[in-house]
Image (cartoon, grey):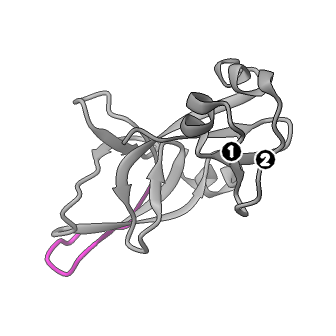
Amino acid sequence: MIKFRAWDKRSEIYLYNVQDAYDTLSGFVKYDDGEDADYDESCFGDFLDNERYDVEQFTGLKDVNGKEIYEGDIIVSKPNELTFEPLKIGVVKRSKINAGWSYRTATDEYNIWTSGKYRTYEIIGNVHANPELLEGHK
């Protein structure tokens, strides 16, 4: 299933279940805390307006804690015992290299693998609420 969330720049909060609400216009959009979002009929057409909303797609992947990974999340890539490499912090984006998802550090792009055989991923924030997490990695 394709899922989206939207960052409301005015309220500075994420709205979840955006696709369901957009499809049905029935007001099922939720805030981060699970409460129903304010609803009006013009609201959903506004998701196409990038002046107010940044719409981000669910990658279909979950982090080590079972949390859904969305475009715009800031993740830490942690190697397991079999791989000798440093931790990497990056922003989840569509890959420029292939058709999949990746995370981008200040200098490189890495594919996100789902197996967990060589590394795990943990969400530590997102580009809107936690930009300070990237300051040392620019």
Residue tagged 2:
37
Left or right: 111, with 6 as reference point: left
Residue 120: image location, x then y, percent: 31, 68
Say which mark, if any, is on residue 73: none
- Asked if residue 71 shows in the view, the reply is yes
Q: Please, what secondary structure does the residue beneath circle 1 have?
A: loop
Tell me where the magenta segment starts and ends, as one range: 78-89
For image coordinates 85% across by 36% down, the residue present is: 10
Structural crowding at the residue carrying mark 2, measured as other residues with C-alpha within 10 Å and reported as few (<14), some (14–19) or many (≥20):
some
Return the residue nearer the eye: 66 or 133: 66
Answer whether labels 2 and 1 touch (C-beta < 8 Å): yes
Quarter of the image with the C terminus is top right
For image coordinates 76% across by 52% down, the residue present is: 36
Left or right: 64, with 29 as reference point: left
Question: What is the three-letter code of the residue carrying label 2?
Answer: Ala
Residue tagged 1:
29
- Asked if residue 90 shows in the view, the reply is no
Measured in 3D between alpha carbons, the distance from the residue under mark 2 to the one under mark 1, in whole angstroms, is 6 Å
Residue 1: image location, x then y, percent: 36, 42
Is 95 located above or below residue 36 in the figure? Answer: above
